[in-house]
Amino acid sequence: MALCDRDPIANVFVGSRVRASSLDPSRLGGQLWGYPDGGELSAVCYSGANLVPVEAGPGAVEAFAAKARMQGRRCSSIVGPAAAVAQLWSLLAPSWGAPRDVRSAQPVMAISGPSPVAPDPLVRAVRPSELDVVLPSCIAMFTEEVGVSPIGADGGAAYRARMADLIAAGRSFARIEPDGRVLFKAEIGAVTPLACQVQGVWVPPEARSRGHAIRGMAAVVGAGLTLSPVVSLYVNDYNLPARAAYRHAGFADVGAFMSVLF
């Protein structure tokens, strides 16, 4: 946890997994590889559905790449700080083959106080009974953002369970109209005492450019600040409307991620 907390924004995903699981393999959702330097743990790499390096310098990245080559690709993505992921992918590419997509520049953004924008008063925590109302929007967001549907061989059971867990934890937010239309939705996917990370921000195409994302994010920021002192997210550099909306809502660039998608 101390290692993850060196950069609580960049390492929020792994930090949240470590805290939630206490490294119990059945709850961690993968393996955690450690790299020692002078007898002290200096870097780790989460290996599960994602491969995520934490505080990894060049020597640690080389060691993690060797481990990953030996194990074979089991992840659907490599994601994390841009420099470490770029080196990791350069070492794995010859043996892992062509990826589906490489997103080499993903600004990491954060806010540590209330949004300067008035929040949408109709954005609220999703109720457990509303899972089926918001799930189509979650699937649409995932498919648009990642490029593939989350409905896999299990018929979407794992994705549905993940969304149900976030709703039960009070970390799924949406503006749901009386007729059941979802005009905005987002989740707080990872939480530590030092930072939390917003994911899955989505507005339906026909309702975009009307300020729903800006005011919705202002509401999510308010909720996030009750969990952690910093609210963060990362976004594709080419998604200029989203970046503009986040800046308008008070977020500022604080780093850069890179993702390799399979």
Image: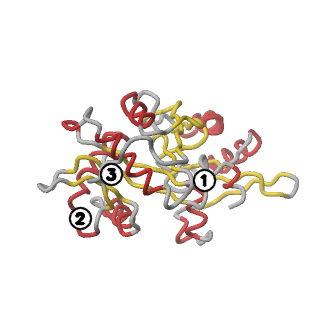
Q: Residue at x 11, y 55 (%)?
A: 179
Q: What amino acid is found at the position of numbered circle 2 in the picture?
A: Glu
Q: Nearer the viewer, residue 83 or 90?
A: 83
Closer to the N terminus: mark 1 or mark 3? 1
Residue under label 3, please give it.
Answer: 150
Quarter holding the C terminus? top left
Q: What amino acid is found at the position of numbered circle 1 in the picture?
A: Gln
Q: What amino acid is found at the position of numbered circle 3 in the picture?
A: Pro
Residue under label 1, please give it.
Answer: 71
Q: CA distance from mark 3 to mark 2?
A: 19 Å
Q: CA distance from mark 2 to mark 1?
A: 40 Å
Which mark lies nearer to you, 2 or 1? Answer: 2
Which mark lies nearer to you, 1 or 3? Answer: 3
Name the element at disc 1.
helix
Image: 128 above or below 256: below
Left or right: 79 as drawn, with respect to 219? right
From the top left corner, tell me how far across and down residue 151 is, in percent. 29, 54
- Give the numbered dot on residue 130: 2
Image: 22 above or below 92: below
Closer to the N terminus: mark 2 or mark 1? 1
